[in-house]
Image (cartoon, grey):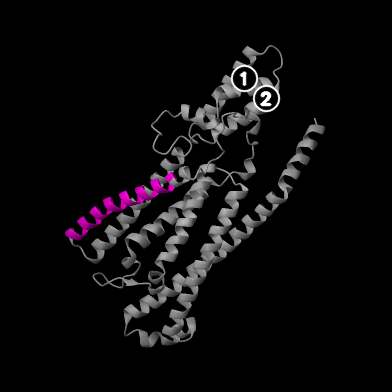
């Protein structure tokens, strides 16, 4: 019953992890029992096809197990939409809680604390609207797992392919980081920096604040790709190419930021890190300048580490994409299947 197994696997991709196994077991049992009741003896492929066509496409069957309202976004996109909204709201709560704590530490004014709370409501609505627009765009441009068809054919179900499933936890972590950075850049552009002592102004990073539009564009590109990956649940040639393109754009932005920090530090210290060490006695008279310079060094090294990680990830994805385009993975799978067939 290969088609039934593929069908149950496809339905499971639309179900939450919490009760996915139970629903798949129930569905597999229902399909098997129905097929046995209809067909005496051993059922053929055409019998399975007829049965599965009656049940309908996997997304429709999965939606029947989750009868909540899914009409705004649609049954295919709604589970991922709900996950992303939950991540975004959680990130906003944490970010605003940290901001409120810093504000009370630097300037304990109750009225400013109320401004932060009112800003949270407005920002939450803006972020929610942005997410809705992204998912509406996915629907509007017909970015689907599979094209809808009047003559749905169970033979077109994807094979059970565990090795190409995404790392769901890693993808969610990437989305969280992207939301944190987006909120920080869009909502608090003048608060990105360091505070020397309570009550003093925030010393902002001049390089980052001058490149906010470029950074935001890179973050949104990465966020859209990761949302699509979270929705699809597995790597495909198109998603790998999109991830490579997003990473290349991010590498360009990182290179611009690193060179900008290097130019600023060279102008400030004269000769890089060792110039900073030699100029520390002079800078002690100006503690804010010293603190900002040290912070700029840490930010620069953080950007360099991010670039190295992104390069490694891009090379790995590029290699896997090349293997998939060349058909090496499919050839190896066929060889393994033939060997398994010969070895009882």
Q: Nearer the viewer, residue 174 or 325?
A: 325
Residue in the image at 68% along x and 11% along y: 40
Residue 207 location (% of width, % of height): 41, 73
Q: Is residue 17 above or below residue 223?
A: above
Magenta-highlighted residues: 111-136
Quick one: 27 or 322, which is closer to the camera? 322
Quadrant assignment, res 282: bottom left
Work out which quarter of the rendered image holds the C terminus and state it.
Answer: top right
Secondary structure predominantly adopted by residues drawn in magenta: helix
Q: In this view, does 43 lie above or below 295?
A: above
Membership of 289 in magenta stretch: no
Near mark 2 (Cα within 10 A), the count class, few <14, some 14-19 or many ≥20, is few
Is residue 155 rendered to the left or right of residue 141?
right
Residue furthest to the right in view is 342
Q: Is residue 140 left or right of residue 9?
A: left
Tell me the SS state at disc 2: loop
Q: Residues within 10 Å of mark 1 (few under 14, many from 20)?
A: some
> SS class of the residue under badge 1?
helix
């Amino acid at each position: 019953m290969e088609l039934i197994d593929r069908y149950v696997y496809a339905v499971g991709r639309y179900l939450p992890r919490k009760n996915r196994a139970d629903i798949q077991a129930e569905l597999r049992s229902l399909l098997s029992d129905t097929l046995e009741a209809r067909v005496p003896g051993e059922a053929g492929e055409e019998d399975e096809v007829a049965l599965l066509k009656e049940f309908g496409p996997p997304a429709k069957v999965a939606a029947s197990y989750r009868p909540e309202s899914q009409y705004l976004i649609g049954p295919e996109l709604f589970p991922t939409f709900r996950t992303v909204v939950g991540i975004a709201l959680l990130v906003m709560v944490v970010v605003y809680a940290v901001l409120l704590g810093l504000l009370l530490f630097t300037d304990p004014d109750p009225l400013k604390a109320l401004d932060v709370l009112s800003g949270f409501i407005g920002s939450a609505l803006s972020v929610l609207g942005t997410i809705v627009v992204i998912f509406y765009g996915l629907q509007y441009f017909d970015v689907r797992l599979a094209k809808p068809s009047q003559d749905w054919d169970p033979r077109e179900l994807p094979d059970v392919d565990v090795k190409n499933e995404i790392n769901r936890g890693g993808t969610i972590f990437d989305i969280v980081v992207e939301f944190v950075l987006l909120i920080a850049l869009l909502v608090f552009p003048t608060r990105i920096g360091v505070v020397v002592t309570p009550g003093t102004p925030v010393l902002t990073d001049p390089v980052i604040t001058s490149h906010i539009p470029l950074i935001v564009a890179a973050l949104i590109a990465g966020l859209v790709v990761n949302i699509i990956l979270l929705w699809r649940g597995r790597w495909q040639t198109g998603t790998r190419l999109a991830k490579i393109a997003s990473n290349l754009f991010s590498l360009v932005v990182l290179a611009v930021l690193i060179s900008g920090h290097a130019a600023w530090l060279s102008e400030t210290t004269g000769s890089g890190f060792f110039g900073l060490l030699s100029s520390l006695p002079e800078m002690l008279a100006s503690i804010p300048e010293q603190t900002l310079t040290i912070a700029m060094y840490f930010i620069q090294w953080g950007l360099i580490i991010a670039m190295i990680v992104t390069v490694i990830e891009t090379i790995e994805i590029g290699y896997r994409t090349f293997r998939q385009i060349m058909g090496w993975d499919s050839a190896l799978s066929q060889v393994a299947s033939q060997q398994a067939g010969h070895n009882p």
